[in-house]
Each structure stands twice: as structure tokens, then as C-alpha cells.
Amino acid sequence: MIRILIAIVAAGLMAIFAVLANGAEPVKIGFVTTLSGPGGYLGEDIRDGFALALKQGNGALGGIPVQLLVEDDGLKPAAAKQIVDRMLKSERVQLFTGTVFANVALAVLGDILDADAVWLGPNTSPDEYAGKGCAPNYFVTGWDETLHASAGVLANEAGVKQLFLMAPNYQTGKQVIAAVKKQFKGTIAGELYTSLDQTDFSAEIAQIRAAAPDAVYEFQPGGLGINFLKQWAASGLKDKIPLIVAAPSLDPRLLAAVGDAASNMHIAAEWNADLDNPANRAFVAAYRAAYNRPPTYYAAHGYETANLIAAALKASGGKIDATFRAAVKKADFASVRGRFSFATNQAPVLDWYELAVAKGGDGALTLTTMRKIRTQAGGAYAELCPMK
């Protein structure tokens, strides 16, 4: 944590020196994210990926000095709303990012967009803004419902006939299940919603055992996933019923925590550390050197968000205006995910892959890309967006 803060402070000092040199005020970026609780490491990784790009730019993005205002929302929508209100009114922030959870995003998006500020979502995105509710100042740089729909595609290709579904009982959890259902062609063997602070999954595992499905789709990100996967392995079901999931259910930090408990998982994702393109190779090496740990999807999204902002700030000369928005939508930057573009609703269109757990050259478990399952796929809601 100290090392991360030093890096951010150093980047901030570089920005100040740049301001003194050219007389310009830095662009303020409101970085409201979840840094505490079971999902705290998700926000930490998004922040660290973003901070890495800022450090590489010597405190600037696209040559424009940046002041990064990082705040922990604690996974509390009301707290996030207060933070954003203060940033809009006191700090005059016109550019926001960092948000991890959709229920938090929903609490602040109305205020951000009403103030004509720009939001770039580096993780999940609310379905409410994906279709008819799309907006010129709303961008998704992480993933939308395509993520979970891709897991439904993966289940179909695996020949699953009966799929059991489980997710936390909040906005994203319900939207996740709906996305899987849209693509899965078999029968739903059961459907459960859990608490966002749940630690004991024994009752849910008992219901899955009784249903005896061909596979289980579970969405339990962060610390929730660590507890679930350890209990799943202890139940004896791990080698009997495969887990077919989307990326948030198994990232490198989750894998390090649960080990072999994740060995019978099949993951739909749009990024992995082993994707072979120049931007990704450079990012993975730089992230490991900076933080002494492998990057996650969240870190990759934070890094990409910063680099996309850099391209847009360069085009607009540091102004958050129509030129900035047009440059964001153009997405003219080197993506670690390969080919990256925006659909009509300004959510990403990407390639999607199947990942699996395997042993690396050092004998340690790692996520390995097995094959591409979808080419340049975007969300189904884009066709409902009235923007051109």
C-alpha cells in the first residue's frame, strides 16, 4: 500500500512540475472506487493499473498534467453520492472513473451526467444506461453484459443441458443472471441469490447438490469468490460438477488465494496476461515490476482507461469537451486486449476467450488462454441506443 501511494504522490509531483512549466492547471479526475471490504482489491487493482499509466506519463496523460483524486466509496452508494457531489461542486471535477460496482454507479451517474461531466466505467456497467438510457458522456471501458452472455455461449459449446445459476442479490447480480439466460439454450436447474457480505455458502451448495446440474454458473467476485470456492472444493462437488463462469469469478488474485479449488473451472474473458500483443506484453511486465504481483482484469481495465483518456486529452488539448468525447469514442490507442472499439452505446466490442487453470513453467497455477469463443462481440442492448 505504501509503495502504491508513493507512486501516486510521485506522479502528482510530476504533474505539479509540469503545471509550473507551462502555466496550465492539471485536469482533475475523480477516481471513486471500492478500496475496502471483500471487493476492495478490485478497486485497488483498477487504481494501480491507472496509476501505472500515469507514472509512465510522468504525471501526465497525453502530455496533459493530471490530478488524480482517489476516494474509497466502501461499496456504499450513499457514500459515493456524497463524494461525487463534493467533487462536482467543490473540486469542479468534470471527468470521473474508477467505479467497481453497478449499484454504486447507479447512485452517482445521474448527478455526473446532469452536470455534463464525463464518466468512464472501468469495470461493470448498469444495463439501465446500455440501451435507451445511453448518453453522450457515458462510456464503458471495462465490460458490459457481453461478459456474462459469453459464459452462456461457453456453456452451450460445452454441451451443458442443465445449468444452475447463483449470484449476489443486488443490481449487477440480477443483470448477470439475465445475461447468461439470454445466451444459454438449455434448462435452468436452479437459481439462487446470495448476500454481498456472505461468508457461508453451505446452504447454497446443498441445494446445488440436490439439483445435480451438468454445470454451475456462479458470480461471486473478490472475497466472496474466495469463500465460495474453498467451500465448494471441501464439499466434494468440485470434480463432479464443473463451474462455467465469467472472468470476475476467477482472477489471478482469487486463484492465488484458492489454489487447486479452482481446477475444474472454465472462464469466459476478454483479456488474459498471456494475450500475445505488444501492448499487453509491455503492460504485464511493467505491472509486475511496479507491484510485484500479476495483473488482473481489473488492473488491465484501469490501465486501458488511463491510456484512452490520454489519447482523448491529447486530441482536446486538455479540455473535457465535445472533442474529448469524440476522441474517446474513436478509441485510438494501443489496447492490451487487442482490437478495441465502441458500439453505438459506447460500450466495448471485443474478442472473447475461454480460460482455464493450468500449471505454468514454474509449476504454479495460472490462468491460461485456451481458445477464442467470440469475435468482436458487443452487448445486445446497443441496438436500443438512439445515438449514432
Image (tube, rainbow, N blue to C red):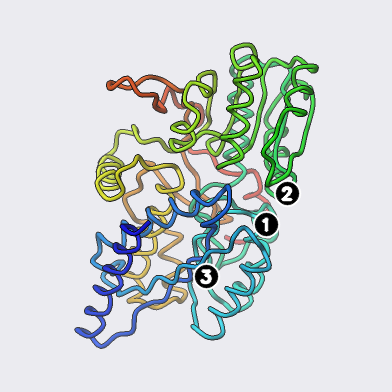
Report the residue at 45% width, 38% height from top. 253
Left/right of residue 292 with respect to residue 345 in the rendered view: left
Instruction: Give the x, y percent position of residue 64.
Output: 30, 73
At numbered mark 3, what does the secondary structure look like: helix, strand or loop? strand
Mark 2 or 1 closer to N-term?
1
Q: Quadrant of residue 330?
A: bottom left
Q: Are marks 3 and 1 in contact (CB under 8 Å)?
A: no
Instruction: Give the x, y percent position of residue 179.
Output: 68, 38
Report the residue at 63% width, 67% height from top. 109
Amino acid on which the number 2 mark rests in the picture: Tyr
Depth check: give the residue in front, 260 or 240. 260
Circle 2 crowding by C-alpha within 10 Å: few under 14, some 14–19, many from 20:
some
Left/right of residue 383 with respect to residue 11 in the rendered view: right
Instruction: Give the x, y percent position of residue 254.
Output: 49, 35
Which residue has dot 2 on it? 170
Which residue has dot 1 on it? 103
Q: CA distance from mark 2 to mark 1?
A: 7 Å
Report the residue at 26% width, 70% height from top. 63
Mark 3 or 1 closer to N-term?
1
Q: Are marks 2 and 1 in contact (CB under 8 Å)?
A: yes
Q: Nearer the viewer, mark 3 or mark 1?
A: 1
Amino acid on which the number 3 mark rests in the picture: Val
Instruction: Give the x, y percent position of residue 101.
Output: 61, 54
**Is 19 placed above or below 40 here?**
below
Outermost residue, bottom side: 23
Numbered tag placed on residue 118 in the rendering: 3
Depth check: give the residue in front, 301 or 252. 252
